[in-house]
Image (cartoon, rainbow, N blue to C red):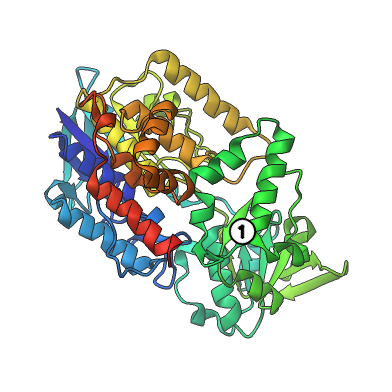
Amino acid sequence: MRVAIIGGGPGGLVSLKSCVEKGIDATLFEKEKSIGGVWAPCVGKTWNTLHTNTSFFSSMFSDFPWPKETELFPDQHAMYKYLNDYISHFKLGQYIKVSSGVNQVDRANDGKKWVLKWTDQQGTQVQDEFDYLIVATGVFSRPGKHDILGLDSFCSNGGQVLNISDYRDANLYRDKRVLVVGTSFSGAEAAGEIGVTSKYPVIQLINKPYYVMKKMTNGRPIDSYLFSREASDFVTKETDITKVLETIHGFYGMLSGQNENVESLVPDKSLPPYLTISNTYLDNIKNKNIDILLNKNCDGFDENGLLSFTNSAGQREKVKIDTIVFCDGYLCQVSFLPQEVKDKIRFVEQDKFLPLLLHKCVFAQDIPNIFFIGMYKGPSYGSMELQARWVSMIIAGQVPYPSEAEIKEGILEEEKIRQQRPRPQIPHPHHIPYCDYIARKMGVYPDETKLQEIYKTYPKLYKMLYNNLMNVACYRLWESIHIDPNSFDQIPCASAVSILESIEDRIYKS
């Protein structure tokens, strides 16, 4: 039984580790010269001054905790090192082929196995057969088409166009008039860095106002508010769409604090809320380092390459721009997959929101030996790990493959999400219910009735699981009941409890 894993980012690495620990013969293929996905310096989707926007407790795997002295919001170098240390700790290097881009995947002659064709480090074309395929390349493959009027005119008049993946150092734009297009998390950080460095304020072109939250709020990291079961229950308790929007807007408004004091960032509460996380963004706006321009007020570039728009005073204005930094999203690319698979997953390359339709973001219709890990907008380390563990248990025969009816229903739900208008910021915002669903399918997390019994025996555990920041280690507290039917009656795993206690000590007691 052989498994091929395509992609060497966090999703691919945790898939490899999950397979290896089950005794499955797995090989990971990474087209770049090093692993790390978006955090790999050679890939260029992050830069050395960029830090995570959530704490490291939300950017870790359940059985590989960060060192205690780690900065709460690690930078690119630290994230890249963490992933390499993960490989070393679990001795995964022998199963990884870097500089080995998969060019094509086809069905084998038996109509079941997969034939992978790739180019190795020496430039030689190689192929081999595998029983299972895991796709973990992520959905941020390449920049999409930039939608701004007059872009050709801007370029022909000497303007410079960059994608956020090309951005490295704010000092390069000290003497430049910069337009940042888009509301991505990295876009907010880049706009802030350039704004405080440049002689000129950055203009940021956005589609709609959004909430801005600081990384630390009342002495705690923002993810401790966003990703607890207590918060999840609060924002998901309503089913009426009007009340849902009201609840989420109220919750985001409470966390963003000063947002309502910035006129250009007052959200329309009849629409799904968007957010970004930055310690300096609001201050940069107030200090005139960043000027917000709504897309509806922008006419694009004129024949002289000048940006034309209506300013906040309602007056027409034209300004010279030297550099545009596009932060308007990426397209998913799975060109190596056969058309048969693309049809089954209903792949739409130009759809930045939900490019492929899968049951629980993992399973394709009618193709039981292909799986997708982290292939949706907004996955976390925790959700990718659970997906990978679930898949490895299925391949190892420890838990059943979802039924045909489950997969059909799941894909119909994804289709509804794809058709939703107006669209929310990410397709699967309810992170904890999603993780709990997978964990219960794996048999590693009790149902609510059993949890209440456990809480009576371990009252401290209740706070750590319900009130505190949710960490993926909670799904290591018990062995799967498919392996040990009496698992939930056993003492919770000490190493998993230790990670939950470290969160309590670092965030809630400091």
User: Which residue occupies the foreground of this view, 445 or 135?
Assistant: 445
Q: Where is 458 relative to 412, above or below? A: below
User: On the rendered image, what quadrant is the C terminus found in?
Assistant: bottom left
Instruction: Please provide percent x and percent y for residue 63.
Output: 25, 49
Tag 1: amino acid = Gly
Q: Where is 167 relative to 445, above or below? A: below
Q: Residue furthest front?
A: 456
Q: Where is 119 relative to 340, above or below? A: below
Q: Which residue is mark 1?
A: 182
Instruction: Please provide percent x and percent y for residue 292.
Output: 71, 66
x 20%, y 17%: residue: 110
Q: In screen coordinates, is 414 left or right of 363?
A: right
Is residue 202 at least partly visible in the picture? no
Instruction: Please provide percent x and percent y for residue 369.
Output: 28, 24
Q: In screen coordinates, is 248 left or right of 194?
A: right
Q: In screen coordinates, is 500 left or right of 209?
A: left
Instruction: Please provide percent x and percent y for residue 3.
Output: 20, 33
User: Which residue occupies the foreground of this view, 390 or 122?
Assistant: 390
User: Which residue occupies the foreground of this view, 113 or 339?
Assistant: 113
User: On the rendered image, what quadrant is the N terminus found in?
Assistant: top left
Q: Residue furthest right?
A: 314
Circle 1: element type: loop
Residue 280 position by quadrant: bottom right
Is residue 203 at least partly visible in the picture? yes
User: Which residue occupies the foreground of this view, 459 or 336?
Assistant: 459
x 75%, y 58%: residue: 266
x 44%, y 68%: residue: 50
Q: Residues within 10 Å of mark 1 (few under 14, many from 20)?
A: many
Q: Where is 450 relative to 124, above or below? A: above
